[in-house]
Amino acid sequence: MSAEWILHSVIFTLKHPAGSEEEQRFLQDGEAALTAIPVVKNFRVYRQVSPKNDYDYGFAMEFANQEEYDAYNAHPIHVKFVQERWETEVERFLEIDYRHHA
């Protein structure tokens, strides 16, 4: 793992009712869209279970370096997903990015 490696993660709560078809569709569509971006590696969808916060889900993915992370952020698939789905279906979120500590 290089020192430039980035783990990008976001925890979030959806506007959809827990266990709903809309909730599952958002998670599945998010994974399908974001994994279609070539620089995305090791994409994961998580159910957040800590009692220390009240977010419900997490997306996490890895990038080899800042250039790949920037390419992801500007990629048309990511931009479209954020505009059409994230901004309308996510109630709130917290984004956390990690770099390997050397």
Image (cartoon, rainbow, N blue to C red):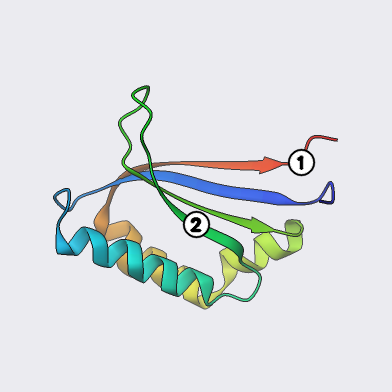
Q: CA distance from mark 2 to mark 1?
A: 18 Å
- Camera-side residue of 51 and 94: 51
- Camera-side residue of 89 and 11: 11
Label 2 SS:
strand
Q: Residue at x 35, y 27 (%)?
A: 53
Residue 2 in percent (x, y) is at: 84, 51
Residue 83 in percent (x, y) is at: 36, 66
Q: Is residue 18 left or right of residue 99?
A: left
Q: Residue at x 84, y 46 (%)?
A: 3
Q: Residues within 10 Å of mark 1 (few under 14, many from 20)?
A: few
Q: Earlier in the sequence, mark 2 or mark 1?
A: 2
Q: Quadrant of the C terminus?
A: top right
Quarter-wise, where is residue 61 in the image? bottom right
Which marked residue is nearer to the observer: mark 2 or mark 1? Answer: 2
Give the residue pinned by disc 1.
Answer: 100
Q: Is residue 102 left or right of residue 93?
A: right
Up-down: is 53 above or below 47?
A: above
Give the residue pinned by disc 2.
Answer: 44
